Image (cartoon, rainbow, N blue to C red):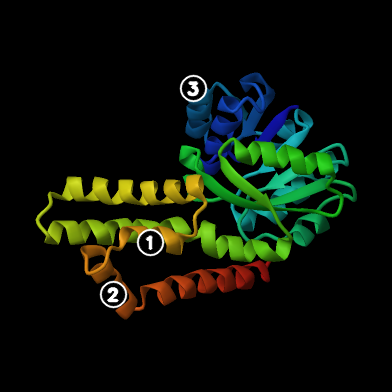
Amino acid sequence: MRIGFVGAGNMAEAMMKGIITGGVAKTEDLIASEIVPERRDYITNTLGVQTVSDNIEVVRSSDVVVLAVKPHHVGPVLDELKPYLSGNHLLISIAAGVKISFMESHLNWGVRVVRVMPNQPCFVGASASGFALGRSAKKEDKETVQSILNSVGVAFALDEKLLDAVTGLSGSGPAYIYLVIEAMADGGVLAGLPRDVALQLAAQTVIGAGKTYLETRKHPGELKDMVASPGGTTIEGLRVLEEAGVRGAFIDAVEAGAKRSEELGGKS
């Protein structure tokens, strides 16, 4: 299986790294196009992947084409590639908010399209992604996309209408957690900890809590109650958070992100 990337930005780089280290494909089976010469050199020198300046060359050399360009470039790029994409190609788009129907309207019938919503931790192999299949996509395509995305984290096949919710939750979510890490570290500094220690303690606490849930599958409420002993420090802190409406604020933030994603998608 030859996998080509149209665009070689940060997300594409992370996916290529995952594909190689996860054994999904060999380095020599990857190719990427990129208009910036310095970026081409970086990808080749760092990952050993062949890079070119021509998008069409990528399509001609690949069975799977990952569209990794900015959303507003999707239409023009697909118009350029339309004569060269056929039913023999699987096209995976990671362009945020660009609907499958929009992409299919710029392609010949039969091109198998899959829309993916990855997130920033893809860079460190810890992505949480959702993806949806287009009209011509096959069961084998679902398995291919699943294996590629699993190489950089976890992924779930969903109806396309749910990808806006994925955007609001896991797409935007890392920014919310960075805010939590920063705020918790500020609290640690206020209590007397050195800044670097406070940041590392806060970040590791987030990692540890997430890993505990994923490995135990106990309800977060149950895990919370295990930490909060009667009359202790944790329940006092939880009282402050509840009074501040933090739980509701997170719910509202995810909902707002999902709605905004839906609005932006309506423009594509």
Q: How far from the left and from the top, in percent, is residue 143?
A: 75, 39
Type of the residue with mark 1: Lys
Q: Residues within 10 Å of mark 3 (few under 14, many from 20)?
A: few
Marks 3 and 1 close (CB-CB < 8 Å): no
As drawn, 148 above or below 238: above
115 or 236: nearer the viewer: 236
- SS at mark 3 in the image: helix
State the residue at coordinates (79%, 41%): 141
For mark 3, what is the residue?
A: 45
In the rendered structure, the answer to whether residue 73 lies left or right of residue 100 reads: left
The numbered mark, 2 or 1, whose residue comes first in the sequence reads 1
- SS at mark 2 in the image: helix
The image quarter containing residue 162 is bottom right
In the rendered structure, the answer to whether residue 223 lies left or right of residue 117 reads: left
Give the position of the C terminus as an image quadrant.
bottom right
In the rendered structure, the answer to whether residue 197 lies left or right of residue 218 reads: left
For mark 1, what is the residue?
A: 224
The image quarter containing residue 192 is bottom left
The numbered mark, 3 or 1, whose residue comes first in the sequence reads 3
For mark 2, what is the residue?
A: 239
